[in-house]
Image (cartoon, rainbow, N blue to C red):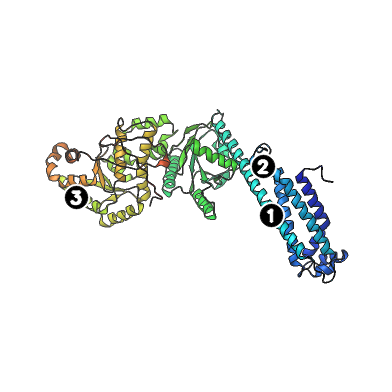
Amino acid sequence: MVSSHPWDAKLVLILSAFAVNYGEFWLVFQSYNSNELAKSMAILKQVPEILGRSSTLKPQFNSIKDLIKAMLDVANCIVKFRELPSQYITADVSAFSTALANIPIAVYWTIRCVVACASQIARLRGLQGDEHPLSTSEAWEISALVHKVSNIHNHLRDKLDACHKHIDDKRHMEAYQMLLELFMTSHSDNMKVLKALIYARDNQNPLFHGATHRRVDIDVFKDTHVLLLISNLDISHDELEVLEDIYRESLKKRPGIQYEIVWLPIIDQSDPWMESSQKLFENHRARMPWYTRHDPLRSPSPEDGAVITFIKKEWHYGRKPILVVLGPRGQVVCQNALHMMWIWKDEAFPFTTSREEDLWKEATWKLDLLVDGIDPRISEWIAAGKIICLYGGDDIEWIQRFTTIAKKVAESAGISLEMVYVGKSNPKELVHTNIKTIIEDELSHHLKGLTSIWYFWVRIESMLYSKIRLGQTVEKDPTMREILKMLSFNNSHEGWALLSKGSEEITKAKGDLFLTCLRQYNQWEVHVRQKGFLQALKDHLLQIHPPHHCNQFELLVAAGMIPETLVCSECGRKMEKFFVYRCCDV
């Protein structure tokens, strides 16, 4: 009767016939002890005696139930093979062809199970008195069939999983190629690009607006510059706090802000998604004043996975945040403007390479570039033409010696010296302890908070990345040499200091050299009146500077743009490259 049908249809028709013939009895049995209607049905069907023994017959019924479940598992799996989209999978795919070859065998054994179940249920319906429902051989046959069909199901399920993975991979690649083509095509606006990146599926309000806490549509970005803040959930408090300050400051200065920021959080397959992850995401989203994709990009989705792959391959995203700038027509203006944002804030708009070059042409290596409003007091002292000393490091003993002798020298020279501790980018706990000591002993001023210290150093790192991106070299760019010296100070275990008067040239040195110079103040004191304090200090530092005094510093690989070679800012020799593995910033 079913020979003309395909194998999956054969199986479904036979299971349907089995359900029609024996399903009613099965339903009555399951509800007999708890449902009066079931008892009445049993009387009509003339099977009350056997159903009254349901408790003693439960093991036999459970065996049949296990077999029926195994049959349905196989049938569902076979039907799912028929439902696989033909445009993504064909018979030349190994898992699919193997499954197709095994489906007739699976159908055969499932039909064997149907026959066995039907036989046992028919026998149960005909039992009288204390007659035993199953012989030992019959019980063994049911158990063997359950085992056989379960193994068939496991095999088919493995092949089905492999087919689904193949389909997901094909969809992933298709979506990835679509993104590539989208960015190679000119557009009249940015809507197609943003929809493909932010939410490819049909969703009317895929964005969450932090300022209003409302869901909004992508069209709020139409014809404007969009800054895609891309990160995982480990984006730091420091990064968020500084970026929030820059964004809010931009809104105050320019009410009709020229760009919008949207956070695209990425969850990799290696990052398990748990309840704590959802809470962390919601906490980040709640504090951000800009827009956020209402849920993170997650790899299991082919569309989201393609976007993640595109971001990693085309925009070189690692695990550190990047800020991709898209123009009003969806074109990529800058693959990572975060360095520009840290250095120049919204002055870098529209974040093009030409704008970055213009800003560097206007800049000179002076204290106002180095601090740029991080601490308003320093900006006031610069404007007043005061002598300012920035110093750092994590050696509290050196800090105590340096601040003590610096105050004595300033008093002897009759100058007003403002000293500010700027710490070190790592380790934070030690810097925090040093600040407490500086406050308690009234050694000097300090940058307010660890976030300000982090920002001071990340700006200097960003300056280096900016110079590298623009193709500058240490040999040809004096500012780049000064940046490398500052980074070498940060990487050193000893202290360091720099002095500047207002916006004049900066004088700096490592800790022991600076201490020696200050201790020898009586040797260069005579030159202070003629040359001025800073020039006399600088000349003496040059006299006592060791003939060979080189540096080391660390660059974050995840930030990208790591040059193949760098030369030492002190001796000009090519520097060696090492690898450092660090798990956190504390």
Q: Position of residue 98 (x, y in %)?
A: 67, 43
Q: Nearer the viewer, residue 159 or 366?
A: 159
Q: Are marks 2 and 3 in contact (CB under 8 Å)?
A: no
Which element carries disc 3, helix, strand or loop? helix
Q: Amino acid at mark 3?
A: Ile
Q: Amino acid at mark 2?
A: Phe
Which element carries disc 1, helix, strand or loop? helix
Residue at 53% across, 51% down: 272
Q: Nearer the viewer, residue 298 or 218?
A: 298
Residue at label 1? 150
Q: How many marks?
A: 3
Q: Amino acid at mark 1?
A: Ser
350 displayed left or right of 448: right
Asked if residue 135 shows in the view, the reply is yes
Residue at label 2? 96
27 displayed left or right of 419: right
Residue at label 3? 405
